[in-house]
Amino acid sequence: MAELAELDDPKAREVNERHGDDHGVNLGKLRALAKRLKTQQELAVRLWETDDTAARLLSLLVCRPKAFERDALDRMVREARAPKVHDWLVNYVVKKNPHAEELRLAWLTDSDPVVASAGWALTTARVAKQPEGLDLPGLLDVVEAEMKDAPDRLQWAMNHCLAQIGIEHPEYRARAVDIGERLQVLKDYPTSPGCTSPYAPVWIGEMVRRKEQGN
């Protein structure tokens, strides 16, 4: 904790706080510290329990993802309110855990929109890598009905799933683009030069174009 405190940079904190992350540690330095510490599950649990954002990010880098029980991960996703902690928890830990599919199904319809967004993030990963057994038309139905009025984090996760369905599954591409065009979610999102807009019709079109050029 003392070492993390030394790494805290007021300028980095100012930038991070704009994104809802209350820490000032450069992520490159955080990863270097994690590399030095290597995997330490007991330390990871203790770091998580501090409730400090930088410590929790470090925890997620030094933990053993498969070591967590289902209920522990459910509790952690409900405690992870900083966006970066939430993102790393889902992508670095839950996705690699044997309870991932069980949690995906439970979280997808959770009344807490931040928890539900974790369910949608796990679903998006399956859309891309393991779509067998997923009800893709059913997912599009939910997106069509609920994405427009969903809270920000949940809306972002649903939009990502919509785009992924359109990118990966040609048979649903026209419907995915149509839903995006009608709902217009993130159409005016500020996008840096050289980056792809998160607006689903543009995102789908650009990623499909790249895949076709690659082929």
Image: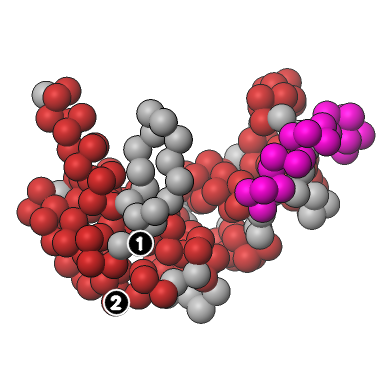
- The span from disc 1 to disc 2 (Cα, nearest Å) is 13 Å
Query: Which residue is at a point 60% across and 40% down the rendered structure image?
Result: 64
> Horizontal placement of 38 versus 124: left or right?
right
Regarding residue 42, the answer to whether it shows in the image is: no
Identified by mark 1, the residue type is: Val
Q: Does the segment drawn in magenta span residue 12? A: yes
Query: The residue tagged with tag 1: helix, strand or loop?
Result: loop
The C terminus - image quarter? top left
- State left or right for residue 16 relative to residue 182: right
Mark nearest the camera among 1 and 2 is 1
Q: Amino acid at mark 2?
A: Ala
**Front residue of 68 and 10:** 10
Q: Which residues are drawn in magenta?
A: 1-20
Helix, strand or loop: magenta stretch: helix
Task: Tell me: residue 195, above or below residue 199.
Answer: above
Q: Which residue is mark 1?
A: 185
* Residue behind mark 2: 145
Nearer-the-camera pick, 10 or 77: 10
Q: Position of residue 49 (x, y in %)?
A: 79, 54
Q: Which mark is residue 91?
A: none
Q: Secondary structure at mark 2?
A: helix
Q: Are the residues at dot 1 and dot 2 in contact (C-beta closer than 8 Å)?
A: no
Quadrant position of residue 196? top left
**Quarter-wise, where is residue 149 in the image?**
bottom left
Near mark 2 (Cα within 10 A), the count class, few <14, some 14-19 or many ≥20, is few
Q: Residue at x 28, y 44 (%)?
A: 203
- Above or below, 11 against 70 in this view is above
Q: Residue drawn 49% across and 45% down? A: 91
**Picture quarter containing residue 185?**
bottom left
**Quadrant location of the N terminus?**
top right
Mark closest to the chain's N terminus, 1 or 2: 2
